[in-house]
Image (cartoon, rainbow, N blue to C red):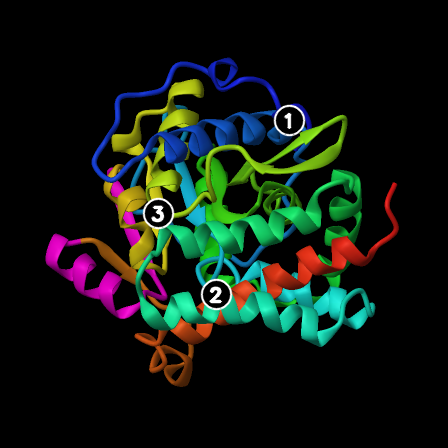
């Protein structure tokens, strides 16, 4: 996202360190919130959506209430970056052996189940070095095409209806995802949502520098992004709702007054039941039976994200 090469202080004062939050996650959250506010002004009227259920919470017209939706397997079937990668592979933008190297790095992490800082830094550096020097506009153009090809038909009607219920109540609705903010913004715009919070890659003059602002918008960083946006938009989080399928998003779900577990994994389902959170499942019985196997889903998401990075590397430099 253009304009995020300024010094750390220019993004605003850091909030007090919270449980599990690091300086990088706070910075990532603040940068994502700022990017989301800038892009939301360009959101068009929402398209026709499935008939929405009556909201069970915040009062219609409550301007201090909003809803935050995780993207992958909550709003959309599968991982956004995986679908993006499919489109790039179809266009012959990368070779299988290049994809395999990056996919294996993330497969190892998922199977090991341990966040080895050195390993994660190696993966991150590899992907960012590939994107470095390419234009943000290229990613946006490709994303628009691939949304129509692979993503539009994978939106969960039930979750889409919930989002529409919030919109109909006069509330703002934001996607919150670890996917690049550019990709997340395309999806939010196509669904007629207010905007999106996503991972912000640093860029100067519309060209990627090969660095992130903070860290990927994952886990505690999502909660920080929601806090930052709520503060900037004068939202009362106790009146807000959040939706996610993953236990990684428990930090985000825990800071709102109306948390929902949607198509939940095993850990989130257990946590939701223990804390009295509402549950929604829009999968078929067969798909729902597959919860509790995060490695497979993780590999798919990483493969797609890696595909996107490799593709950008193979495209003509501007």
162 left or right, relative to 223: right
Looking at the image, tell me whether mark 2 or mark 3 is earlier in sequence order. 2
Region rendered in magenta: 257-276
Q: Are marks 2 and 3 in contact (CB under 8 Å)?
A: no
183 left or right, relative to 227: right
Residue 151 shows up from this direction: no
Q: Position of residue 284 (x, y in %)?
A: 42, 80
Does the stretch in magenta take in 219? Answer: no
Number of numbered tags placed on the structure image: 3
Q: CA distance from mark 3 to mark 1?
A: 27 Å
Picture residue at 52% right of the left edge, 71% below the top: 104
As drawn, the residue found furthest toward the left would be 274
Q: Quadrant of residue 133?
A: top right
| Label annotation for residue 106 | 2
What residue is disc 1 on?
Answer: 41
**Mark 3 element type:** loop
In the image, residue 33 sits, relative to residue 111, either above or below, namely above
Picture residue at 53% right of the left edge, 65% below the top: 301
As drawn, the residue found furthest toward the front would be 118
Looking at the image, tell me whether mark 3 or mark 1 is earlier in sequence order. 1
Picture residue at 58% right of the left edge, 59% below the top: 80
In the image, residue 100 sits, relative to residue 85, either above or below, namely below
Looking at the image, tell me whether mark 2 or mark 1 is earlier in sequence order. 1
Which is in the foreground here, disc 2 or disc 1? 2
Picture residue at 29% right of the left edge, 36% below the top: 21
What residue is disc 3 on?
Answer: 219
Badge 2 local density, few (<14 within 10 Å), some, or many (20+)? many
Which is in the foreground here, disc 3 or disc 1? 3
Q: Position of residue 22 (x, y in %)?
A: 32, 34
Residue 3 shows up from this direction: yes
| Label annotation for residue 168 | none
In the picture, the quarter occupied by the N terminus is: top right
């Amino acid at each position: 996202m253009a304009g995020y090469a300024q010094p750390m202080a220019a993004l605003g004062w850091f909030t007090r360190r919270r449980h599990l939050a690091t300086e990088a996650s706070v910075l990532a959250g603040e940068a994502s919130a700022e990017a989301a506010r800038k892009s939301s002004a360009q959101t068009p009227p929402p398209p026709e959506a499935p008939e929405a259920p009556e909201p069970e919470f915040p009062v219609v017209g409550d301007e201090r209430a909003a809803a935050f939706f995780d993207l992958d397997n909550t709003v959309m079937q599968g991982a956004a970056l995986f679908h993006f990668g499919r489109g790039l592979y179809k266009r012959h933008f990368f070779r299988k052996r290049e994809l395999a190297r990056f996919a294996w790095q993330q497969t190892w992490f998922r199977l090991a189940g341990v966040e080895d800082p050195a390993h994660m830094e190696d993966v991150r550096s590899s992907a960012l070095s590939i994107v470095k020097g390419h234009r943000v506009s290229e990613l946006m153009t490709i994303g628009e095409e691939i949304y129509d090809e692979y993503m539009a038909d994978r939106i969960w009607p039930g979750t889409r209806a919930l989002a529409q219920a919030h919109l109909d109540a006069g509330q703002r609705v934001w996607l919150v995802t670890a996917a690049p903010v550019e990709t997340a913004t395309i999806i939010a715009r196509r669904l007629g949502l207010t905007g999106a919070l996503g991972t912000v890659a640093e860029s100067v003059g519309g060209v990627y520098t090969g660095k992130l602002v903070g860290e990927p918008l994952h886990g505690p960083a999502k909660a920080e992004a929601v806090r930052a946006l709520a503060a900037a938009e004068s939202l009362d989080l106790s009146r807000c709702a959040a939706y996610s399928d993953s236990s990684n998003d428990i930090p985000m779900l825990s800071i709102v007054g109306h948390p929902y577990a949607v198509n939940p994994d095993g850990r989130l389902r257990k946590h939701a039941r223990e804390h009295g959170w509402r549950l929604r499942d829009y999968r078929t019985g067969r798909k729902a039976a597959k919860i509790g196997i995060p490695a497979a889903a993780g590999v798919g998401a990483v493969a797609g994200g890696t595909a996107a990075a490799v593709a950008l590397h193979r495209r003509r430099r501007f």
